[in-house]
Every structure is written in structure tokens, then in C-alpha cells.
Image (tube, rainbow, N blue to C red):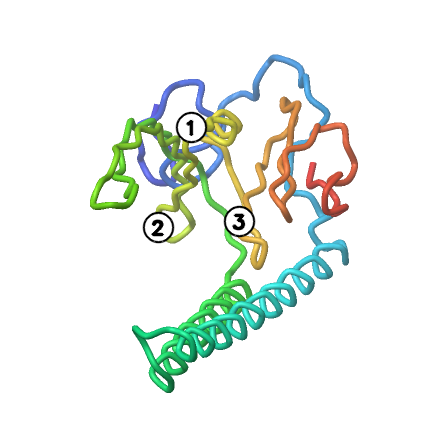
Amino acid sequence: MYCKHCGTALPNDTRFCTGCGAQTGSAPDSHPPTGGGRIGYSERIHDPAFARYLKSTNRWSAVFSVILAVAAVIGFTIYGEVSSEMENPQALFIGLGIGGMFLLIALYTILARKRSKTWDGVVVDKTVKEKTRRHDTGNNDSTIDYYTEYAVIVRDERGKNHRLTAEDDRTVFDYFQVGDRVRHHAGLNSYEKYDKSHDSIIFCNACATLCQINDDVCFRCKCPLLK
């Protein structure tokens, strides 16, 4: 069969187009729902708990970056006083540079959360790749680490692909299926499935903790679960 909206070739039993995310018009799954979730995006995303979580996350990002910046300045200043390899003010300037880098990273992270948008998309692919990376063990020596990368590819309304990746953990990979409609929530930068009626687990859209679908709130951050 082909999508009547964009012409993408699809399997006959596909309920949502992997090209544009539109419903194909095929008959719904004849199997009754087995999970405790629902079909549709949850209005609980507007609960004040999410706004409080974002405010707290941004505050702690700022506080942590300030602590690291101060530690870098103090540490390099002391090093410049006691070390024969580097003197002040050179060591102080290096500490100021590293401290400023920590502050800029925190500022960029906070601004990125504020500028992110809510958008709808569809899971278009899933991949499993065996990869390697070189790990420096010191003394001019290194080892090769082997790991498996599990990736879920989501295409947004503008046709841009987004990758959800995990190393040696296929939980998210198994949670999403090709053809699933998803919503990306601004600020939280998390994904909510449209159809959760067959799920037994759910990820907290605030802190990403894995919860049971029958739970009402996340046991870690206490934000409502979007089920």
C-alpha cells in the first residue's frame, strides 16, 4: 500500500506513515490493549510539576557551573603559587579561561532548553551497530572498547531526522516501533508516544526514569507520567 498523503510505500498493516506520520486509514489493531496506557497525547504535560522541574534543573545547572568555575580559578591559582612548572598570573588566567568555559556550557544548555520547540514526528527507522572506540590508559598506551549502539530515528514535521541512541542498552530501542507517532516536548527534550495502550512500561518525560505504566507519577522526580 502507499500513503495517500505523501506516496511512501508501506506494509499493508501499517497504521501510520513512516514518511509523513499521517494515519493511513487502515483498520486499527484487532488485538485488545494489554497495557495501562491510552491512545493520544496526554494533557498532563501542562501540570505545574513540569515547570517546577525545569526551573529547578536550570537553577542547579547554573549553581553547579559556578562551583566548577570557582574551583578551577582557585585550583590553578594555588598551583601557580606552589608549582615550579607554572607561575601566576599565567596559572590564574588558565583557571579563569576554564572557569569561563564551564559557565558558557551551562548558559548554552539553559538557553537550548528555553529555545527548544514542541513538535510531532514519527519513528522511521531503528538501527543496531557494533562499534569500537579507543580508550587512552596512560603511558602512551590505549585499549579498544567494543560496544553496541542502539538507535531510534524520529522524523519531525519538517523532514529532519533525530536520533535517540544508547550504548549496550536496548530498552528505548524496544520501547519504540517503526511507525509510532511521537511528540517532542519543549524544554524537557523528551518524547511521548501517541499510542501507549499496549505498553507495560513508560519513561518519565522529565527525568527519563523507567516506570511502570500503572504508576501515576514518577517515583524519582514526582512528575506526572504522560500515559
Secondary structure type for disc 1: loop
Give the structural element (helix, strand or loop) at label 3.
Answer: strand
Earlier-in-chain disc, 2 versus 3: 2
| Tag 3 residue | 184
- The image position of residue 205, as x and y in percent, is 63, 45
Q: Nearer the viewer, mark 3 or mark 1?
A: 1
Give the spatial CA distance, label 2 vs label 3: 13 Å
Quadrant in which the N terminus appears: top left
Residue annotated with mark 2: 160
Image: 37 above or below 221: above
List x then y, in percent, for residue 19: 36, 38
- x and y percentages locating residue 227 in the rendered image: 69, 36
Q: Residue furthest bottom?
A: 89
Residue at numbered disc 1: 168
Identify the residue at horizontal 60%, vertical 13% (top origin).
30
Q: How many marks?
A: 3
The residue at 46%/26% (across/down) is 170
- In the rendered structure, which amino acid carries the disc numbered 3? His
Q: Is residue 80 above or below residue 140?
A: below
- Amino acid type of disc 1? Asp
Distance of label 1 from label 2 (alpha carbons):
26 Å
Looking at the image, residue 93 sits to the left or right of residue 171; the answer is left
Residue 95 percent across, percent down from the top left: 42, 76
Q: CA distance from mark 3 to mark 1?
A: 24 Å
Q: Quadrant of residue 63?
A: bottom right
| Neighbourhood count class around disc 1 (C-alpha, 10 Å): few under 14, some 14–19, many 20 upward | few
Residue type at the position of mark 2: Lys
